[in-house]
Amino acid sequence: MNYQSLPAHATRLFCLLLILCASLLLPGVKAQPAQRQPTPNDTLKTPQALADKRVVFKIYAPKADEVTVSGDFLSDNKPLSLTKNEQGVWSVTVGPLKPDYYTYTLMVDGVRTADPKNPVIKQGISSLENVLLVPGQETSFEDITTVPHGEVREVWYSSSSLGTMRRMHVYTPPGYEKGATKYPVFYLLHGGGDDDSGWNTVGRAGFIMDNLLAAGKVKPMIVVMPNGSMPLPPSTGTGTTPSTQALTSMRSMFANEFRNDIMPYVEKSYRTLPKAENRALAGLSMGGFQTLDLTLTNPELFNYVGVFSSGFFGPTIDEAENQYAKALGDPNFNKSKKLFWVGIGKNDFVMDANKKTLALLDKHNIKYQYKETEGGHTWTYWRQYLNEYAQMLFK
């Protein structure tokens, strides 16, 4: 093109375009994006644990009409409403709360919402919850402290029982990788709605074990946290209550996978000590039910058993005596157990199932240690039970 033949204004425009194109090709020269208007969300910090142990929850949602928060810090389980200010920030202050780790969930116009300002979460099989810490001396047994730390791994294995890949979390004590020592194994089961990550996240299991080991209160051990949530069978009953067939099916699925896949994988892949005297089992809620089932179906597998906030639920209590007749009638059952520990909160909604289960054990002279604490069906107490139960193992 002979740009000298163009009109003067066209020549100037052509030159400007050449300069612009050249500038874009030069290294380090970038087009400037449009400036974004700052919002209160840019500096928002939440949740905030105040010095007086109250906690402030906030979320920036200027177009929302209603925001609530719920969590295990609420004794009545009723969601709290947040109030919106002129800048579109919703907030509510709760407490004071006892120092501990808590989970919470926000609802924005009826939609379950993870707190966008808090990256600490607890994962479930169908949802997420955020985790907050109210610091204090009471949490020292579960905090991250300056002690030697073990490792918690996500371990994938092929489940022949379920025909799919499955995951478990495995804690190994400090020094495991560099040594040749064999260790006892503690199988720790989660509750309904959770997966194998529960005990490792909000359950604080790894940090609890680290602190106990550093204080010389427990023997070094491997802690296996499998996924106890099974595929839901077609017959699930009415509403949210599983039918007897569904409970029986899920119980059998987990027991089969535990015996045929989980235990063999652990004993092949890790340096474990053999025999029941070097194995412990415990679980909370659904995991406690699974613990009872495995203990009474295969009493030869474990010398240490722990049941947290659990029992034979619903229709299973009626069939338990027949289902486990062999173990319940075994005069040597008590001799095979160095520890049978049961813990529950006074206000736990499964207390009725717990009492009926203990009555069944009493009827057949099964010996156990029983601890009734304050509180209900929450992680606050399950972490404390773990801390206490672990100190009684392999002694």
Image (cartoon, grey):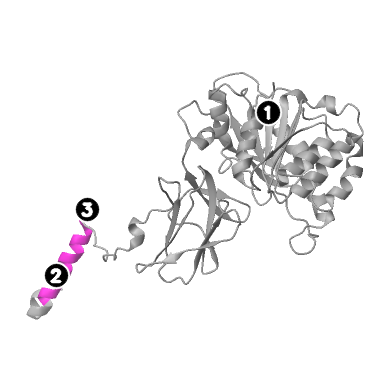
Q: What element carries label 1?
A: strand
Query: Can the viewer see residue 149?
Result: yes
CA gap, disc 3 to disc 1? 58 Å
The total number of labels drawn is 3
Which residue in the protein does label 2 denote?
A: 16
In the image, the segment drawn in magenta is 11-28
Q: Position of residue 356 (x, y in %)?
A: 82, 45
Q: Is mark 3 on a helix, strand or loop?
A: loop
Which residue in the protein does label 3 denote?
A: 28
Amino acid of disc 3 = Gly
Secondary structure that dominates the magenta span: helix
Amino acid of disc 2 = Leu
Relative to 52, 267 lies left or right = right
Q: Which of marks 3 and 2 is nearer the N terminus?
A: 2
Identified at 74% across, 55% down, the residue is 232
Q: Which of marks 2 and 1 is nearer the N terminus?
A: 2
Q: Using the image, tell me which numbered label, if any, was put on residue 185.
A: 1
